[in-house]
Image (spheres, rainbow, N blue to C red):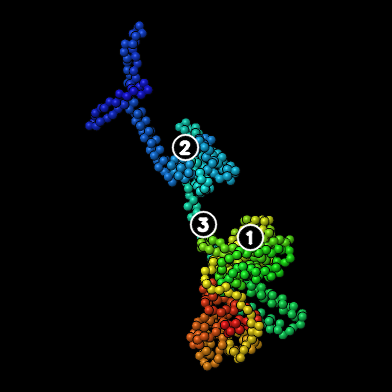
Amino acid sequence: MRALNGEAYIVVQQFGDHRLERRYYEVRFSPLFNKDGERIGASSTSYDVTERVHAEQQLAETREQFRVLVQGVSDYALYMLDSNGHVTSWNAGAERIKGYRADEIIGQHFSRFYTAEEQAAGVPATGLETARRDGRWEIEGWRLRKDGTRFWAHVIVDAIHDEAGEFVGFAKITRDVTERMESERQLEEARQALFQSQKMEAVGQLTGGVAHDFNNLLTVIIGGLDRIARSKPSAQASRALDMARTAAERAAGLTARLLAFSRKQALQPTPLDLNVVVRDMTELLHRTLGEDVELEGVLSPRLWRVELDRNQLESAVLNLAVNARDAMPDGGKLTLETANTYLDANYATKDVEVVPGQYVMISVADTGTGIPGDLLQKVFEPFFTTKEPGRGTGLGLSMVYGFVKQSGGHAMVYSEEGQGTCVKLYFPRYYGEAPVAERAQTAASPVARGGEVVLVVEDNPDVRTYSVTSLRELGYEVVESFEAEAALRLLAGERRIDLLFTDVVLPGKTGRQLADEARNMRPGLKVLFTTGYSRNAIVHQGRLDPGVELLPKPFTFEQLAARVRAVIDA
């Protein structure tokens, strides 16, 4: 017999049906008194409470199982809130995820887990109202731990009602899904990178398909204009020639920019000191910016070297400077800055193409009108521009982007409306021991010397005629061929040939195959390639193959003279 609060429970073991059955009885004792009020005994009444006791035991077991279950869940923060949002229970998962012990947080309002921005926006209160009204509130967002760090949380809040249907509080489940969110973000970046790559490939195929023939036409046009200009035309004709040549050069630049954006241009990288490049460009930049724009250089000492195509780098910086000038119509300040920097793995998550490591940064910052935030993601897209119609092709920044990416670098734009824009270009540090290359000097008189012979191989008859005529005007003896096999027969003979000047794209064998066989026949033969689009014959990973000399189409009379002379003299 056990006495509990004045009541006695008697356990009676009964046997039946070959099993032991335990039943519970509640016995109530009442005292008996005589007529004089003296206690003479007691009476008892017993009740079978087996079912009630079993129910209480099951409830206690259920509660214990629930407690063990809740406390055993470490991946979820499970806790209860009262009707006003104060914490009333706290499991081990909540302690692990949020960093608070139960005795530190019970009684505190749950809004302390939310960022200041969400608190200011009234998110916690709105969430509880939603859960009270609809029965459930589900949301994802940044949440705060005890130590102040943030994590991305998936939160579910359910309204709780008692057996009578009265609202009594909330049950809250929070899960740390930062890794999932980060994976989804990286997947989205990978999708965007794939889309960008596919877009560039499409532009590259389109550009490459027309670049060769288009640049052949421009070579003939520019060559013809050069020849007319050298004939000393009248002043009126000279002005017309200048306009025609400017238009032809702009057309050539358009193709070059498309090739640059699609990373199809042939780069000729050499070791460079960006400080030297910036200093050498100072005079050009002053002329480009005009008197209303102040130019300032912030050049870091002991700058690491990079390996880049200097011409393309200067074009990129000039493009950025022109954009900056246009963004400062009333004048302003343009700052060129260089610095050594390190892009770590955390930064690399912003761009799947970024390889963590040491980089050299060059930035171009202006005090202009700035770029709206919703347009920042589009600034590198081809043909996108914030300028008025007719003021730019929208290819300047896309050319810069293509050049930087083709060079293994990274580009970022920071801007705020009314506060200016800063474009930062990051290039991998160059670890080689090669000396910094100096700009090649054009020969004072790039003409033939002593009966030098050039073999011209070009399948386009107009370009071939222009090249042959120009070389003869420079004093060279010239032999010509329209395809590789005929050129090889000429090379197999006894005739002197100082230079093979060949197009890359030829019928049958390519210019590269022709050059390889020619050098087997004549070791040491100098070779100069020309092309409007190489199609990977002499370019791999965006760089000219070692030892390859290239004169891109379209080329002028002066460019042809200088390159032929330089290759023969090399």
Q: What residue is rendered at 54% in x and 92% in y?
A: 495
Asked if marks 3 and 1 touch (Cβ < 8 Å), the reply is: no
Residue 156, how many percent across, how many down?
49, 43
Residue 124, how many percent across, how many down?
55, 41
Above/below status of 404 relative to 420: below
Give the residue type that dot 1 points to: Cys
Q: Is residue 483 left or right of residue 230?
A: left
Image-quadrant location for residue 129: top right
Q: Is residue 162 visible?
A: yes
Give the residue type that dot 2 points to: Asp
Element type at mark 1 = strand
Residue most toward the left? 18
Instruction: Name the foreground residue: 465 vs 366.
Output: 366
Instruction: Name the foreground residue: 202 vs 546.
Output: 546
**Mark 3 highlights which residue?**
346
Q: Quadrant of the C terminus?
A: bottom right
Q: Is residue 213 left or right of residue 164?
A: right
Circle on res. 297: none
**Mark 2 highlights which residue?**
103
Local crowd size for mark 3, using a 10 Å CA cut-off: few (<14), some (14–19), many (≥20):
few
**Mark 1 highlights which residue?**
422
Q: What residue is rendered at 55% in x and 74% in y?
A: 435
Residue most toward the front? 302
Q: Which comes sooner in the sequence, label 1 or label 2?
A: 2
